[in-house]
């Protein structure tokens, strides 16, 4: 566990927020679940001196994740932070749009608590201070250990 890492997770679905937060807490990962994307700047700015990663759900009805990605990349305070596009949709068009709108990484949402743990473990293992966007490594594929070959 990286004590200095904090994940901000924006999602309009309260159940997805709860599952992610509960999994993160059980894994010892500090997470701030946000149901309102307008709260992200104030919450991120409160976490001074910490490594920050923003997870953005792409399929949100009021303000889509694509719109939020554009806003984050235009914000003077937030544009340099790593952003993970987090979505159940994983078709080529969605993935390309996430790349085009500035996400640093694309991760398909998990379908089990074990997959969420693996996602959190993989995100924690990344050295975000030296991370560079790479189109060849943009999609992070995470599977539970028992399903890996």
Image (tube, rainbow, N blue to C red):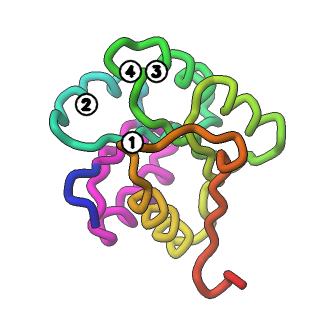
Q: What span is colored magenta in the figure? A: 6-34
Q: Residue at x 36, y 57 (%)?
A: 21
Q: Earlier in the sequence, mark 3 or mark 2?
A: 2
Q: How many marks?
A: 4
Circle 3 residue: 72
Label ID, residue 94: none
Q: Relative to 123, is 87 on the left or the right?
A: right
Q: Earlier in the sequence, mark 1 or mark 4?
A: 4
Q: Badge 3 local density, few (<14 within 10 Å), some, or many (20+)? A: many
Q: Earlier in the sequence, mark 1 or mark 3?
A: 1
Circle 4 residue: 38
Q: Earlier in the sequence, mark 3 or mark 4?
A: 4
Q: Up-down: is 95 above or below 110?
A: above
**Distance between mark 1 and mark 4 Cα atoms:** 16 Å
Q: Earlier in the sequence, mark 2 or mark 4?
A: 4
Circle 2 residue: 43
Contact, mark 1 vs mark 4 (Cβ under 8 Å): no
Whole-percent x, y for residue 104 in the image: 55, 37
Q: Residue at x 46, y 21 (%)?
A: 72
Q: Quadrant of the N terminus?
A: bottom left
**Distance between mark 3 and mark 4 Cα atoms:** 11 Å
- Name the secondary structure under disc 4: helix
Q: Badge 1 local density, few (<14 within 10 Å), some, or many (20+)? A: many
Q: Relative to 74, is 3 on the left or the right?
A: left
Circle 1 residue: 53
- Name the secondary structure under disc 2: helix
Q: Up-down: is 56 above or below 17?
A: above
Whether 15 is among the magenta residues is yes
**Distance between mark 2 and mark 4 Cα atoms:** 10 Å
- Name the secondary structure under disc 1: strand
Whole-percent x, y for residue 24 in the image: 35, 62
């Amino acid at each position: 566990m990286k004590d200095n890492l904090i994940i901000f997770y924006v999602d309009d679905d309260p159940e997805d927020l709860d599952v992610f937060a509960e999994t993160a807490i059980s894994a010892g990962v500090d997470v701030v679940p946000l149901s309102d994307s307008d709260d992200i700047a104030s919450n991120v700015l409160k976490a001074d001196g910490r490594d920050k990663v923003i997870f953005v759900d792409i399929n949100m009805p009021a303000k889509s994740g694509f719109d939020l990605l554009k806003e984050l990349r235009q914000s003077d305070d937030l544009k340099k932070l790593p952003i993970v596009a987090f979505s159940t949709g994983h078709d080529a068009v969605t993935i390309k749009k996430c790349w085009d709108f500035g996400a640093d990484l694309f991760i398909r949402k998990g379908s089990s608590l074990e997959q969420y743990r693996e996602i959190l473990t993989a995100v924690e293992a990344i050295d975000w201070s030296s991370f560079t966007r790479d189109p060849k490594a943009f999609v992070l594929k995470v599977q539970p250990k028992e399903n890996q070959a």
